[in-house]
Image (tube, grey):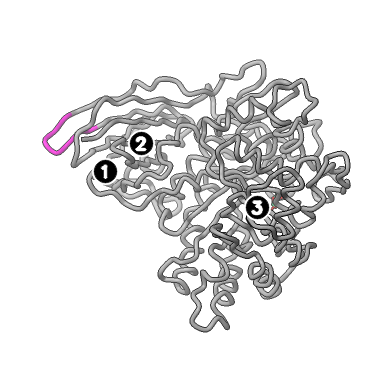
Amino acid sequence: QHSTASAVVNLDVPGPTISRHLYGHFAEHLGRCIYEGFWVGEESSIPHVDGIRSDVVEALRAIRIPNLRWPGGCFADEYHWKDGIGPREDRPQMVNTHWGDVVESNHFGTHEFMRLCELLGAEPYISANIGSGTVRETSEWVEYLTRGDQAPMSQLRSRHGRETPWNVTFFGIGNEPWGCGGQMTAEQYVAVARQHATYARNHGQNRLCRIAAGASDDDYAWTETLMKHLTKGLGDKRPADIFQAISFHFYTFSGTWADKGSATEFSGEEYWATITKAQQIREILAGHAAVMDAYDPHRTVGLALDEWGTWWNVEEGTNPGFLYQQNTMRDALVAAVHFDAFHAHAERLMLANIAQTVNVLQAMVLTDGHQMILTPTYHVFEMSVGHHDAQRLDVHWKRQPTTTPGEEPADPAVDALTVNASVKDGVLTITAANLDPDQANTVELELRGAHLGTVSARVLTGETVSTHNTAAEPQAVAPRRFEDIETLLYDRGTQLNLTLPPASFITLCADIT
Ligand code: AHR
C-alpha cells in the first residue's frame, strides 16, 4: 500500500558543488560503440559530420555530456595511439583481443575522438596504455595532444591537419591493472604508473589531471596501497604532485559474473537484488573516501568512478564479446540510485563515467543502421541536467531509512525513495525516484528559507519495471508532464507533496527568491 515520507530542505543552506563531471560517459573500442555507434565514416549514407553520426551527437548534446572517456577500458592497454593518426587508408590494423577478437581498422583515432568531443561539447578523458605501451608512447601522446610550439609531436600533429593543440585535462594512467590491464599487483602498478605519470607532462597552459587506475568494487586495500605510495619518497611534495585522482570501477547485476541475468526478463526478486546491489555504491564510495581521507585530509586527490552501470547477459543472437544489452526502467532507477550516492559524496568524488554511451552495456542510445532509440537511462541523465555544477541542498529525512536487515521500516517510503535537491543561478532542481515497483509513494517536502516561483515537473515511468524502448515503440519509456503535486504555503516556505507512481523518476524545477 501507499506510504508517505517527510523531509526538509533548507533552500538557503547551499552545500558543495555537484560537479557536472559526475555525469560523465565512456566510449570504448568495444562491439558497436565506436564503429556504427559514433563512427560511420565519411562515405556513409547515415547523416554524419566528418564521419560521426549526427543523430547520436544531437541526442547526446541534450544530456550535456561533460566528459567522455576513451579508448578503453581493457582496449586502452593494447592501443598504440600512433596507429590511429594520419591518412586512414595507411593506418595499420590490429586485433581487439579483449572484445570479440575482431580486427580493428584504427579509422577512429585521436583526431576523430577529439572532433567527437568538440561536436558533443565534452571534455576528453584519455586513457593511456600502461599494460603494453611504453613510457615514451605516453609522453609523446601528451605532447601530440597538448603542446603548441615546434616540438616533434606538435609538428607531426600539424602535418596531420591540426596546428593548434587541444586542451586535455583528464588523463588516465592505465585501466584495471589488476586484471586486463597487465595482471599487476598494486605495488607493481604504482611503480609503473609513477613513471608514466611523471612523463605525462604539463605543456604550455595545459594542466593534466592524472588519474591512477584503481580498485574493483570495495577493494580498499588497492586504494590504500596507491595512497601510501603516492606520498612515499616525495619529500615535501603533496600527493597531488604525481596523481591528481584515483579511480575505481563498480558494476551492477542481479546474478553472478558468469550469469549476470537478463536485461529485460527478470523476477521481482531479481529486481530487488539489482537495486540492493546498486545501493552498495554509497557504502563503497564512503569506504574509498575514508581510506583517502586518512592520507589526504585536504582532499588534494580526487576520487573517480570511471566505470559504472548495469551489466547483463548479451541480447540473444548478438556477439558475446560485444556486450550489447537492452535497457529498461530498472536500469533508469539504477542510474538514479547512483546519482543519489554521487551527490552525497560530492566533496571527494570528482568524476564518474557510465559504461558505455552507445550500444554497449548501460547505453544512452541504441542504434541499428539508420535507426536510433533513446533508452530509459538516457532520460534520467537528461532529467538531471539541472544538477550539473549546482550546489547541493541536503535533504533531511524526518525518519531515517532502515539499517538493520529484516527490520520493519518505521517509514517504508523512506527506504523506497531517493530525493536530491540543488540550486544554481536561482533555479531549484529536485529529482526523486520511487524504487518500489508495485506501489506509489508520497514525499512531503518542506522547502524552507525561500519562496518558489512556478513549478514545472516531468515524470519517467513505464507500464512495468521491465518496460523498454524499441524501434517499434521508441516512446514506451519517455518523460511526461508530472501533475501529482500538491503545493501548500506556510510561514517558513512551501511544502510540496509529490506522489510518485511505482518505479518512477521525477524532475522538478522552479525559480527561488
Ligand atoms: O566496460 C567494459 C569493460 O569492463 C572495460 O573494458 C573494463 O575496464 C571493465 O572490466
**Residue underneath mark 1:** 9
Examine the image and state in which quarter residue 404 appears. Answer: bottom left
| Contact between labelled residues 1 and 2, with CB atoms less than 8 Å apart | yes
Identify the residue shown where x is 47% and y is 26%: 460
**In the picture provided, is 374 more to the left or to the right than 79?**
left
- Where are the magenta residues, as a range? 489-495
What type of secondary structure mainly makes up the magenta span? Answer: strand
Label 3 and label 1: CA atoms lie apart by 38 Å
Q: Which of label 3 and label 1 is nearer to you?
A: 3
> Where residue 330 sits: x, y (%)?
55, 34
**Residue underneath mark 3:** 126
Label 3 and label 2: CA atoms lie apart by 32 Å
Report crowding for label 2: few under 14, some 14 to 19, many 20 or more residues within 10 A (C-alpha).
many
Ligand 1 closer than 8 Å to the CB at disc 3? no
> Where residue 240 sits: x, y (%)?
51, 69
Identify the residue shown where x is 65% and y is 43%: 114
Kindly tell me whether residue 354 is visible in this rendering.
no
- Secondary structure under the numbered disc 1 in the rendered image: strand
Three-letter code for the amino acid on which mark 1 is drawn? Val
Q: How many marks?
A: 3
| Contact between labelled residues 1 and 3, with CB atoms less than 8 Å apart | no
Looking at the image, the residue that sits furthest to the front is 150
In magenta stretch: residue 318:
no
Report crowding for label 3: few under 14, some 14 to 19, many 20 or more residues within 10 A (C-alpha).
many
Give whichever of discs 3 and 2 has the lower sequence position. Answer: 3
Q: Which mark is residue 227?
A: none
| Contact between labelled residues 2 and 3, with CB atoms less than 8 Å apart | no
**In the picture provided, is 421 more to the left or to the right than 67?**
left
Label 2 and label 1: CA atoms lie apart by 10 Å
- Secondary structure under the numbered disc 3 in the rendered image: strand
